[in-house]
Image: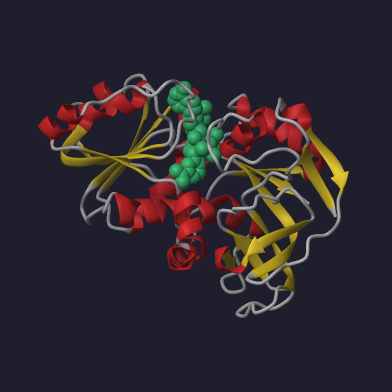
Amino acid sequence: MRAITINEFGGPQVLTEAELPDPRPGPGQLTINTTHAAVGLVDVFFRRGDLAGRPDLPQPPFVPGLEAAGTVRELGPGVTGFRVGEPVVTLSQVSLGGYASVTLAQAAMTVSLKDGGIDPAQAVSALPNATTAYLALTRVAHLQEGESVLVHGVAGGLAATFVAVARSLGASHVTGTVSSQARIKDTGHLGLDGVFTSDRFVKDLDGRLVDVVVDPVGGDLRTASLDVLAPLGRILLLGHAARTPDSPVTGDELWHRSAGMLGFEVGSILRDNPATARPAAEKVVGLLTSGELTLRVDELPLAEAAEAHRRLEAREVPGRLVLTV
Ligand SMILES: NC(=O)c1ccc[n+]([C@@H]2O[C@H](COP(=O)([O-])OP(=O)(O)OC[C@H]3O[C@@H](n4cnc5c(N)ncnc54)[C@H](OP(=O)(O)O)[C@@H]3O)[C@@H](O)[C@H]2O)c1
């Protein structure tokens, strides 16, 4: 198969094309003839070796790519519920490997796209992250109908999916922050009730308090979020896109505000509880079919994986970037 490999941690140039043996599916697995592979910031962190100290950090050589779409190529022993040729998308790919013409996936983490006519580029861009959003909002933040939601870095790949998912769960008012005035135009399709730049959002909210803050950005934005949190509000901690040191918050600060800070990492949750993946994914498939969840997606050929990483790191991507195979 054609694949993009990482033979050492480093800059985008370490992403090189190679011919590798086709993977074969074992029990509980299937293989996919990949047509689209999404590129996310976590792929950049894996490539750079940024997640030092994490026991699950992939070590070179490896083929990156957590999210892939295509058609079923081969079913492993005991796998039922899929047919060869059926269009599918993977959720979080524990074993990576999406930047390749053949992707090996866990059947429990694979969702059929045979009904609904969903565009595979949209599916691979939105479905895995929207499943994360659904699990985070329902199982961790326990979003209630009528509550308000503020999504930081709302133009980003993960963050953008929270808007439609929060609305589908009955959120009353959904706003977002972006890093610059120029980025506001990249959020027009999301249907937000308001967009603020991250340096002024506390001022621009003008005293309006928020029940749930969604934060994949971190740094000062995270700490400032406490100032806009309603009593009994929750901040969902999802990532560190800003790559700045986390600001410490004491238990007393949370206690006195009746506030919660709740972490969620989909990879480890689904690895330990794969059965939670599909019911959540099936909820969000409906949002894609109806068009309630639509992302801005740009495509590049697989051979340009290094350019895709360069753009993402330079924060030049106004939505999601997908590699076509
Ligand atoms: N918890 C989970 O299960 C889970 C799942 C998927 C991803 N993640 C994490 O979520 C984070 C985002 O991933 P992604 O793939 O969505 O990345 P992405 O598409 O590159 O989006 C990152 C967003 O963060 C914003 N941002 C970056 N630096 C910033 C700064 N200094 N100040 C303000 N905003 C800043 C960017 O704003 P601009 O566009 O304006 O630059 C962009 O909107 C990563 O840390 C990733 O590891 C977590």
- 131 sits left or right of 209 in the view: right
Number of numbered discs visible in the structure rendering: 0
Q: Position of residue 288 (x, y in %)?
A: 51, 60
Foreground residue among 25 and 143: 25
- Using the rendered view, name the quadrant where residue 15 is placed: top right
Q: Which quadrant of the rendered structure holds the N terminus?
A: bottom right
- 100 sits left or right of 161 in the view: right
Does residue 33 show up?
yes
Rendered position, 236 above or below 250: below
Q: Position of residue 61 (x, y in %)?
A: 76, 40
Furthest residue toward left: 256
Foreground residue among 51 and 109: 51
Q: Position of residue 172 (x, y in %)?
A: 24, 50
Residue under the image location 33 percent in, 52 percent down: 137
- Using the rendered view, name the quadrant where residue 83 is placed: bottom right
How was this image coloured? secondary structure
- 270 sits left or right of 1 in the view: left
Residue under the image location 52 percent in, 42 percent down: 157
Does residue 160 show up?
no
Q: Position of residue 7 (x, y in %)?
A: 78, 35
- Using the rendered view, name the quadrant where residue 230 is placed: top left
Residue under the image location 62 percent in, 61 percent down: 89
Residue under the image location 57 percent in, 36 percent down: 41
Rendered position, 259 above or below 276: above
Rendered position, 309 above or below 114: above
